[in-house]
Image (cartoon, grey):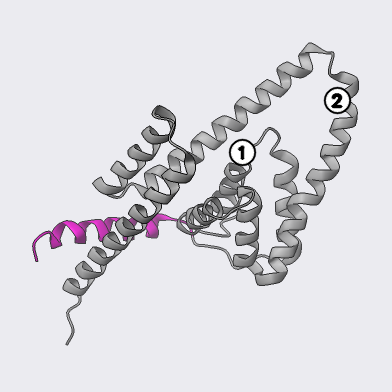
Amino acid sequence: MPGGLAWRNVRRRHTAENMNQKAIEPPPSLYAIFMAFALIALISVGGGVSGWMMRDFVTRRRWISSEEFLSGLALAQAFPGINVVNLTIWMGYRFRGNRGVVVATLGLLVPAIAVAIAIVSVFSELSHISSVHYALAGISAAAIGLSLEMGIFAARQSMTGLLPILITIATFVSIFVFGVSLIWVIAIVTPCSIAAAWWHMKKIRGAESDDHPAA
């Protein structure tokens, strides 16, 4: 079929990339989930929590693949509420079902709340020291860099063709150049993105059918 060779090449490249990824570990225990999320809550000072999650769960622990993580991140950003909490709920359910949701959420929130209360009480006594403000600015810059790294990684994974690239550019220009309301951008771009993904997967399945014809 016309264009079949191109889509077969896409599929083979995608398969090769998956083979090069390290094997995903078995689902972690509830204790491991709690400790992992608690550690992220304690070390992700200045923001960039989703970036820490990607590095820890995808790269270091290999509890989840990069494709699954990005899918969960997309859902977390689409749902109302705090993105990081939504992502935590999704990952907890992905690891251990309903119990994983409870444990992961507690691990993310309880240590962070305790530390935040302690820091606020101490910061009121140290706020007049200029070096404290410089340190906080440096921490924030590092968090921004981590978030930027995750954004670039997600963009590279999702830009699988001309149409996704155009959608990404249109979204960026609409928000940051023309100042279009985020609600309108989501309402318009989301159906376009879903349609582009559906069309892409349909082409890949068509290429697979050509490679493996029915007997």
As helix, strand or loop, the secondary structure at mark 2 comes to helix
Q: Position of residue 123 (x, y in %)?
A: 85, 25
Residue underneath mark 1: 48
The amino acid type of the residue labelled 1 equals Gly
Q: Residues within 10 Å of mark 1 (few under 14, many from 20)?
A: many
Mark 2 or mark 1: name the one nearer the start of the chain: 1
Label drawn at residue 189: none
Give the residues drawn in magenta, as a range: 1-22
Secondary structure type for disc 1: loop
Quarter-of-image position of residue 146? top right
Task: Report x, y in % for residue 180.
Answer: 43, 35
Q: Which of these two is toward me, 62 or 208? A: 208
Q: Kindly identify the amino acid type of the residue bearing the numbered disc 2.
A: Phe
Work out whether 5 lies above or below 215.
above
- Residue plotted at (38% across, 49% down): 188
Quarter holding residue 64: bottom right
